[in-house]
Image: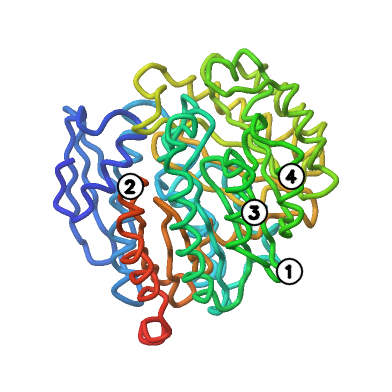
């Protein structure tokens, strides 16, 4: 979008809520009038003008007001032009709750900004519930750290998935060398965490590894010292009694069993090599030993709100500690991206709203939330928990509260400074051969990122 501000990319994100920005014949012009910014937006032959208060106590707050006014003007202009409103209004960031915390620290409340940005009442209330549920978990102690290990192997690629993962049936030759390198990286990275909050082994599908290789990973991670310790068991077709015994042996406290849907026809279309019956069988293997997280996806190909509601009801009946409701998000790399039209925004909204009501009625509370680009219905992913069962790792990572030391191909380490005021990242190479070739450089770069000197001088 043409604009006289430095926020062209931000304004394009707003336009993309309504139609592809590249197809919009639109311009934006902002003029500082002293006490307010005057934002003029032209769309085709129509012109819209909006004012937004100027000011702030420092340069950062002044810039934020400048940007928020521009985004809100473009949002309101396109909303008027198309006759559509978005549930999150002009907010396009992926972590609305993080924004709410910042507003709480600076203003003492966050509703004012959310109202200003035209966030709908249900979404404002959702954030309020999440902030409340995070009490007792939300912790900005600078010594805190989380430890993440990425396993880039799956039994097959789901058609909606854009993660950088390898089909283990085709790439199994890399597994021994990958685990060798990963174990070395883990050994070097563990001392970088001062006060361990949680361990998370994710993927991919960690339990897709053969038992002997899975045990090598678990042995490399070692004792979590009483911290929360999660492994994504994920795909029910990979969960076995032998692998569950290994997780218990090494002190894992939480696992993920992710049906995504309880509809067998949908599972077959997605390329997931299991049935709903397998979910029930494998859940029975873990429910008495571990806390359990379970994922569902709203908006899957071919599913109606009624089909999705049955999956929600089925998950609730099993009563895992956490249920996360994801909204379908098709990115580059997902087989469905070029083949499938999204379910209408209204249809996905009906799914998400049903899940929210049904989970609340069953005693679950929302405790974390994040958004992504290209989400159906411009909605969100929300994690729900039974009382006292929230996943610490999910809260820490979504709110970016503390260091995250991450190991493995495509893993992203984050060093958090000033309670989240600044975050520095280091991303490991995404493909396995490059990761193996650069292992020593990866270890050195991560040690530099989390070095006491670097943290002290930041």
Question: Pointer 4: what residue?
Answer: 244
Q: Nearer the viewer, residue 386 or 445?
A: 445
Q: Earlier in the sequence, mark 1 or mark 4?
A: 1
Which labelled disc corresponds to residue 184?
Answer: none
* Residue 374: image location, x then y, percent: 39, 34
Element at badge 1?
Answer: loop
Alpha-carbon span between mark 1 and mark 2: 35 Å
Look at the numbered discs 4 and 3 and tell me whether their residues touch, using CB distance below 8 Å: no
Q: Secondary structure at mark 2?
A: helix
The residue under label 3 is 130
- The span from disc 1 to disc 3 (Cα, nearest Å) is 25 Å
Of the two numbered discs 1 and 3 on the same chain, state the one appearing first in sequence. 3
Q: Considering only order in the chain, which callout, 3 or 4, is on the residue closer to the N terminus?
A: 3
Calculate the distance from the C-alpha at mark 2 to the C-alpha at mark 4: 30 Å
Residue 103 shows up from this direction: no
Residue identifier under label 2: 433
**First of labels 2, 4 by sequence position:** 4
Ranked by sequence position, the earlier of labels 1 and 2 is 1
Q: Residue at x 42, y 43 (%)?
A: 174
In which quadrant of the rendered image does the N terminus lie?
Answer: top left
Give the crowd class for mark 4: few <14, some 14-19, many >=20 residues within 10 Å.
many
The C terminus sits in image quarter:
bottom left
Question: Which one is closest to the eye, mark 4 or mark 3?
Answer: 4
Residue 30, horizontal then vertical, whole percent: 19, 53
Say which residue label 1 marks. Answer: 226
* Direction from residue 223 to residue 442 in the image, left or right: left
Q: Residues within 10 Å of mark 2 (few under 14, many from 20)?
A: few
Spot occupied by residue 287 in the image (x, y as percentages of width and height): 81, 42
> Marks 3/2: CA distance?
41 Å
At horizontal 67% and vertical 43% (from top left) the residue drawn is 256
| Circles 1 and 3 in contact, beta carbons < 8 Å | no
Sort mark 1 into few (<14), some (14-19) or many (20+) by Cα contacts within 10 Å: few
């Amino acid at each position: 979008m043409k604009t006289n501000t430095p926020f062209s990319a931000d304004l394009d994100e707003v336009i993309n809520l309504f139609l592809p920005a590249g197809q919009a014949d639109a311009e934006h012009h902002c003029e500082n009038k002293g006490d307010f910014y005057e934002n003029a937006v032209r769309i085709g032959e129509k012109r819209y003008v909006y004012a937004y208060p100027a000011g702030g106590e420092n340069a950062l707050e002044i810039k934020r007001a400048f940007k928020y006014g521009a985004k809100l003007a473009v949002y309101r202009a396109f909303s008027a032009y198309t006759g559509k409103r978005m549930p999150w209004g002009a907010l396009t960031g992926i972590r609305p709750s993080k924004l709410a915390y910042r507003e709480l620290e600076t203003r003492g409340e966050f509703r004012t900004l959310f109202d200003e940005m035209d966030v709908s009442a249900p979404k404002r209330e959702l954030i309020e519930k999440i902030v409340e549920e995070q009490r007792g978990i939300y912790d900005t102690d600078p010594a805190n750290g989380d430890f993440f290990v990425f396993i880039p192997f799956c039994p097959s690629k789901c058609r909606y998935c854009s993660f950088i993962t390898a089909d283990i049936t085709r790439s199994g030759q890399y597994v021994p060398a990958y685990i060798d390198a990963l174990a070395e990286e883990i050994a070097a990275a563990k001392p970088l965490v001062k006060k361990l909050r949680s361990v998370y082994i994710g993927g991919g599908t960690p339990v897709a590894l053969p038992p002997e290789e899975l045990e090598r990973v678990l042995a490399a991670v070692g004792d979590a010292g009483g911290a929360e310790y999660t492994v994504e068991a994920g795909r029910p077709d990979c969960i076995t009694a032998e692998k569950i015994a290994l997780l218990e042996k090494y002190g894992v406290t939480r696992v993920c069993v992710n049906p995504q849907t309880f509809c067998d026809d949908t599972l077959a279309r997605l390329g997931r090599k299991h049935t709903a019956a397998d979910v029930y069988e494998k859940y029975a293997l873990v429910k008495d030993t571990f806390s359990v997280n379970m994922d569902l996806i709203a908006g899957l190909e071919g599913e109606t709100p009624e089909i999705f509601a049955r999956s929600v009801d089925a998950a609730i009946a099993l009563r895992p500690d956490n249920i996360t409701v994801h909204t379908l998000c098709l990115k580059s790399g997902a087989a469905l991206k070029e083949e499938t039209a999204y379910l209408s925004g209204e249809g996905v909204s009906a799914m998400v709203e049903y899940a929210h009501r049904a989970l609340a009625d069953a005693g679950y509370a929302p405790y974390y939330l994040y958004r992504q680009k290209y989400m159906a219905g411009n909605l969100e992913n929300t994690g729900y928990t039974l009382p006292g069962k929230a996943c610490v790792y999910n809260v820490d990572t979504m709110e970016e509260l503390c260091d995250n030391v991450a190991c493995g191909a495509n893993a992203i380490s984050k060093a958090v400074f000033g309670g989240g005021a600044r975050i520095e990242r280091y991303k490991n190479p995404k493909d396995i051969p490059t990761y193996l070739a650069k292992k020593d450089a990866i270890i050195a770069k991560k040690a530099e990122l989390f070095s006491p000197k670097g943290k002290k001088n930041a």
